[in-house]
Each structure stands twice: as C-alpha cells, then as structure tokens.
Image (cartoon, rainbow, N blue to C red):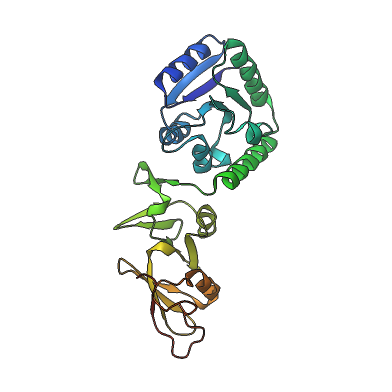
Amino acid sequence: MRIRTLVVDDEPLAREWLRNLLSREDGVEVVGEAEDGFRAVLAIQETRPDVVFLDVQMPGLDGFGVLETLGPRELPALVFVSAFDQYAVRAFDVHALDYILKPFGQERLHATLERVRARLRDRQAGEALESLSTLVDELRALRSYPVWLLVRQDGRSFFVRVADIDWVEAARNNVLLHVGKATHAYHDTMQGIEGKLDGRRFLRIHRSTIVNIERVKELEPWFNGDYVVALRDGTKLTLSATYRWALKSFRRPTVPGAEGRVLPGGPAGEQAVPLES
C-alpha cells in the first residue's frame, strides 16, 4: 500500500527534515508541501493526499484553521506535528490519527505510518468521518469561529477575512459576501454560513440577509413591523418583522442620553436612532 503524504510546516528546515525521514520509509510518497495554512488548504484540495503531517502553530491560518476551513468531508487522515504539547494533546488524543511532539525520530514516525496504513485499510469510513466531524466541532468550540473563508470564484481560490465582511446575501445556489465594494460568491446555504459566523458580530435580520453589526449606522422603523437597516457605506437592508427579536442586539447606548432607548419599544412615534456617535 502506497501512502501519499503532504507536509505542512512554516519552517523550511522542518519540512526538509520530515521529508528526509519520510523518504526512508517504504511505500511512502511525498506529493507536496505547504508553508502555511492557506497554501495547505489549496494543496489538500489539489493533491488529495492520504495523510497530512500538519504543524499546529503557523502564522496566519494555523493547523486549527485548516480544519475549520476545509470541514470534515474534505479532510484526509491528519497527523499533527508540534513542538508544544499545550495545543492539542488533550483535544486530539481521542480523535486525531496521531499527534507527534518535535523532535521525533524514525522509529516514532514509522509507528505513526503504521497507524496510517491501518486507517487506510479500515473500511468503516463512516466511523472515521464521524470522528473527524467531532474533532472539527470541538476545535470550533475551543477556537470560536473561523477567521478566514475560502472562496472559489471564476477559476480562482482565495481567502476572505471574516471580519471584513459587511453583509451576506442569499443567492440561488450560493451566498454573496459583500466586502467593501467587492462581492464574492461563496458556496454555502444561509443556514450554513450563519453557523460559521460569530453571532456576537453577525446577525440574521432577514431570511436572505445577515449583517455585520459593526457596520450598522442606524435603524429606521418601516411598515408592518419591518425596519430599514442603514449601513455606514449607505447600503440599506431590511430587518423583517420575523427577525424583530434581533433588535435587542442593537440595544446599546451609543449616543448621549440614549441609555435604555436606543430603539423605541412601540410602533407609535418611532424614529431612526443612530448607532454611532
């Protein structure tokens, strides 16, 4: 059985050292390497390795972020490699295929590869997928929400920083991420993207709209219990009566004397209230 491996580490010497160890093992092929989490995501999708030796601590998108970005169905077998045991030994011991502390030798690597071979022979793919799903859920609980989203558009793959998203709009087979003057199609449902966004920052205000609360300038009562949500860039969105419970997320004192009345309670005499000083 031939094992196709991908090496991910931000240190060139560490990648070279691991490649050298892997080259001494029979039936092992290194199909690529990546120097950070962003390139790792793309390399995993392009090369489809059997196993990834993934460094935990990397700048930008770290090992945790790679898992969060890809999701369990795109993940191969994972072997975490780190010089620090505080990152994942406790969290990964049950769910990850292996976790190796640097430095390690040929014997330790050989034992890991035997575990990889056993996993690849395992026909119970559903059990492995369930384990990876549990791992991703635990990582998201530990790490909160993804910092980046991988967007594939017009034959390109690139990352969008979640904090830069102004609002999200439902489209036919995707959602549209509005980032400044740019709009990016992202392959997901509204329910799916809502689960990836921190509810303390992003708010569902309509069945087809999610807004970054920090971009909201003011709310203006409209008809039938709806509100107009004005963003700082001039964009106007609708907060439907169905999501009126979300108004409490905007009840924060931002203008002098507005404490307790950032938004009026009843429809009569309601006025637009600025949400910035």
Name the quadrant containing residue 157. top left
Quadrant in which the C terminus appears: bottom left
Determine the residue located farthest toward the bottom in the rendered image. 268
Nearer to me, 165 or 257: 257
Q: Residue at x 66, y 21 (%)?
A: 115
Q: Is residue 49 visible?
A: no
On screen, residue 267 above or below 16: below
197, 153: nearer the viewer = 197
**Residue 168 vertical placement versus 235 (above, below):** above
Instruction: Pick whichever, 55 or 51, lies toward us.
Output: 55
Q: Does 206 appear above or below 260?
A: above
Q: Quadrant of residue 270?
A: bottom left
Question: Can you say which quadrant of the picture contains the N terminus?
Answer: top right
Q: Nearer the viewer, residue 124 or 35?
A: 35
Task: Name the spot of residue 201 as percent of width and height, x first.
Answer: 47, 59
Inspect this view and state whether residue 221 appears: yes
Up/down of 109 relative to 39, above or below: above
> As drawn, is 14 to the left or to the right of 112?
left
Q: In the displayed image of the protein, which residue is found farthest to the front?
A: 257
200 relative position to 124: left or right = left
Q: Residue at x 54, y 15 (%)?
A: 28
